[in-house]
Image (cartoon, grey):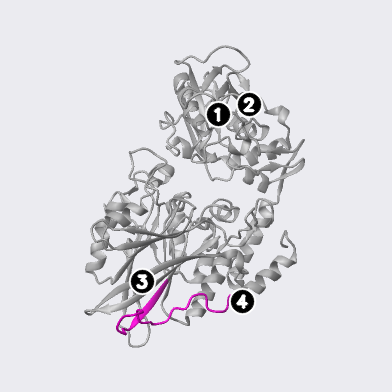
């Protein structure tokens, strides 16, 4: 495995690693400037989040070292090097390491040990357990993606960890009690002659799992409000001796949700800091944002709560530093701050690489298996704003599977539509050999296929909602592909539908953009009372993205993974030819004139 930028990149990293052996931040007992000398001690918290199955600095979809336009690196092995450097710098002084969730899903490596050779069948240790155990975390919080593969796999992964997994607001429906460990109180030595510091660590997971993984958790787990749960447990932790309280939360800080009001808020971290007294700092994740240091004032106490989010995939490491003093026999934090470290400054930790090497190599071999030949190159680069063959490939397979499954049922006479989103802007099927990694790069999520019945009116409403993805651009105004969409709407929340022909007029206001919706190949308008079977992934059908009308009883749900259905179809055909499935059916217009 060689770097795409050549050996000079490795040499630079090695030099950076050597330079980094010098102390990063001086952290020694100190006296406040200008005040009477008083003894202080220090504590450092190192935080990771949203590692999403990344151990090696490797892109399984390109079969090369990971790189992006900002030259970020990824992986737990890189995080380990930074963590080890800081532990060495601190020479044994108090250093905690926490993770804020979304750990066991997101790469072909993680998928392989959940689907191809699931750890629940083989008994093998999960690669993320191997990697994180080498680092020796103090605790991990469960993220919403921890529930993707079902509770048995999650429970086994937790048992394989050498440290606690926390989720205070995940409740066992049958017993009404916490389904996982809510918190820990860890005794920490701050050094010679210092009384023991008792650090409370509370874990909070995302309520959206009730929607996103309904099939895995419904009737088994409920997910309570993260704010209310913190308000319940922080006083308990304090009463049980916690000198300071740290929260590891899998939820962003924006105060918004990608779903409706039927569930507690998705991204409440800043609100937790503001509304719940007694919290000193919050490590958070979920939004994949880089928040170096944010202070939120608690409304009741006036105390400043420190927040930090370390991006995604192991690209960043949060470092929080706390200065503590003894006041009237109690510990008090007198100073706190946060910095962010970039993993592209270091080489990978060899112990982590060794722990996962065999699993990594097996995954690389698997994703490089050829499944079919493509007659031409198919790219997803334009799929957001133009009807492309590669997205039609997804919709064709989904339509074919549902049509076959419903043959002979009372739904057999209904037209089948299919919904797909442009998950990746970089996915390509090269002309010639198409490998598993090419298909996985097109369909990057572990979604399963379902189908529901929608009326013509519901289809129109659905398309209007999807069309909010685009900015409003008057006729004649520049329409550049990179600026045409609203940055507040992610690509995965823009859906296209096959099986009908329609126009999206982006000069018109949101909610009035579907100006043409007709039966395929005709000028016959779709009536409001028309009935269609609609093939859709489980995330969307369960309410992900808050699309209207789609959360209803399924007429098809055989728990088949869409990515595997695409692979199976390609293997069975042997050839991927756009002539077999590409039927241009939608376009962007302004006053009837195509934008592209």
**Which type of secondary structure does the marked residue at label 3 adopt?**
strand
Tell me the tag on residue 19: 4
Q: In this picture, is 189 found above or below 160?
A: below
For marks 1 and 3, the one nearer the N-term is: 3
Disc nearest the viewer among 1 and 4: 1
Alpha-carbon span between mark 1 and mark 3: 49 Å
Q: Is residue 26 magenta?
A: yes
Marks 2,1: beta carbons within 8 A: yes
Q: In this picture, is 79 found above or below 25?
A: above
Which residue has dot 2 on it?
A: 595
For marks 1 and 4, the one nearer the N-term is: 4
**Which type of secondary structure does the marked residue at label 2 adopt?**
loop
Residue 464 visible in image: yes
Tell me the tag on residue 473: 1
Tell me the tag on residue 335: 3
For marks 2 and 1, the one nearer the N-term is: 1
**Range shown magenta:** 20-44
Alpha-carbon span between mark 3 and mark 4: 28 Å
Nearer to me, 171 or 99:
99
For marks 2 and 4, the one nearer the N-term is: 4
Q: Could you tell me which residue is drawn at 32 percent across and 52 percent down?
A: 271
- Label 1 Cα crowd, 10 Å radius (few <14 / some 14-19 / many 20+): some
Q: In this picture, is 331 found above or below 58?
A: below
Marks 3,4: beta carbons within 8 A: no
For marks 3 and 4, the one nearer the N-term is: 4
Quadrant of residue 439 in the image? top right
For marks 2 and 3, the one nearer the N-term is: 3
Alpha-carbon span between mark 2 and mark 4: 53 Å
């Amino acid at each position: 495995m060689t770097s795409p930028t050549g050996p000079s990149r490795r040499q630079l990293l090695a030099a950076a690693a050597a330079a980094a052996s010098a102390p990063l931040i001086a952290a020694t007992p100190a006296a406040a400037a200008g005040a009477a000398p008083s003894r202080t001690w220090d504590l450092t918290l190192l935080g990771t989040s949203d590692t999403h199955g990344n151990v090696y600095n490797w892109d399984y979809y390109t079969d090369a070292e990971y790189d992006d336009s900002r030259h970020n690196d990824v992986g737990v092995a890189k995080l380990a090097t930074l963590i080890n450097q800081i532990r060495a710098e601190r020479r044994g002084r108090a250093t905690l390491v926490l993770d804020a969730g979304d750990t066991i899903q997101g790469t072909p490596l993680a998928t392989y040990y959940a689907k191809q050779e699931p750890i629940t069948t083989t008994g093998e240790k999960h690669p993320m357990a191997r990697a994180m155990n080498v680092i020796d975390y103090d605790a991990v919080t469960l993220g919403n993606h921890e529930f993707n593969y079902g509770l048995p796999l999650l429970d086994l992964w937790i048992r394989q960890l050498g440290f606690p997994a926390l989720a205070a607001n995940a409740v066992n429906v049958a017993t009404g009690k916490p389904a996982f460990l809510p918190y820990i109180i860890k005794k920490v030595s701050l050094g010679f002659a210092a009384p023991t510091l008792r650090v409370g660590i509370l874990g909070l997971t995302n309520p959206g799992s009730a929607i996103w993984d309904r099939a895995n958790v419904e009737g088994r787990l409920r997910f309570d409000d993260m704010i209310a749960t913190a308000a319940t447990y922080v006083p308990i932790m304090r009463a049980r001796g916690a000198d300071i309280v740290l929260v590891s939360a899998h939820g962003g800080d924006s105060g918004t949700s990608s779903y409706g009001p039927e569930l507690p808020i998705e991204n409440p971290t800043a609100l937790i800091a503001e509304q719940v007294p007694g919290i000193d700092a919050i490590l958070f994740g979920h939004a994949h944002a880089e928040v170096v240091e944010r202070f939120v004032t608690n409304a009741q106490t006036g105390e400043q709560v420190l927040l930090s989010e370390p991006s995604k995939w192991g690209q960043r490491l949060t470092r929080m530093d706390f200065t503590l003093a003894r006041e009237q026999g109690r510990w008090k934090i007198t100073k706190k701050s946060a910095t962010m470290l970039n993993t592209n400054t270091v080489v990978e930790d060899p112990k982590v690489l060794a722990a996962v090497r065999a699993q990594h190599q097996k995954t690389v071999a698997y994703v490089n298996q050829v499944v079919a030949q493509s007659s031409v190159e198919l790219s997803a680069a334009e799929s957001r704003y133009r009807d492309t063959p590669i997205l039609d490939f997804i919709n064709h397979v989904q339509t074919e599977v549902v049509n076959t499954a419903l043959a002979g049922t009372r739904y057999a006479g209904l037209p089948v539509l299919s919904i797909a989103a442009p998950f990746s802007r970089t996915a390509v099927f090269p002309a010639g050999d198409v490998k598993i990694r090419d298909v996985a790069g097109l369909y990057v999520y572990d979604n399963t296929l379902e189908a529901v019945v929608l009326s013509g009116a519901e289809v129109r409403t659905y398309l209007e909602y999807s069309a909010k993805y685009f900015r409003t651009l008057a006729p004649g105004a520049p329409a550049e592909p990179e600026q045409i969409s609203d940055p507040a709407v992610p690509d995965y929340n823009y859906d296209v539908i096959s099986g009908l022909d329609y126009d999206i007029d982006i000069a018109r206001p949101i909610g009035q953009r579907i100006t043409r919706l007709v039966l395929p190949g005709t000028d016959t308008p779709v009536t409001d009372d028309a009935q269609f079977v609609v093939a859709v992934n489980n995330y969307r059908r369960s309410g992900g993205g808050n699309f209207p009308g789609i959360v209803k009883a399924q007429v098809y749900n055989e728990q088949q993974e869409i990515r595997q259905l695409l692979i199976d179809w390609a293997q069975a055909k042997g050839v991927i030819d756009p002539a077999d499935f590409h039927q241009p059916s939608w376009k962007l217009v302004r006053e009837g004139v195509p934008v592209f």
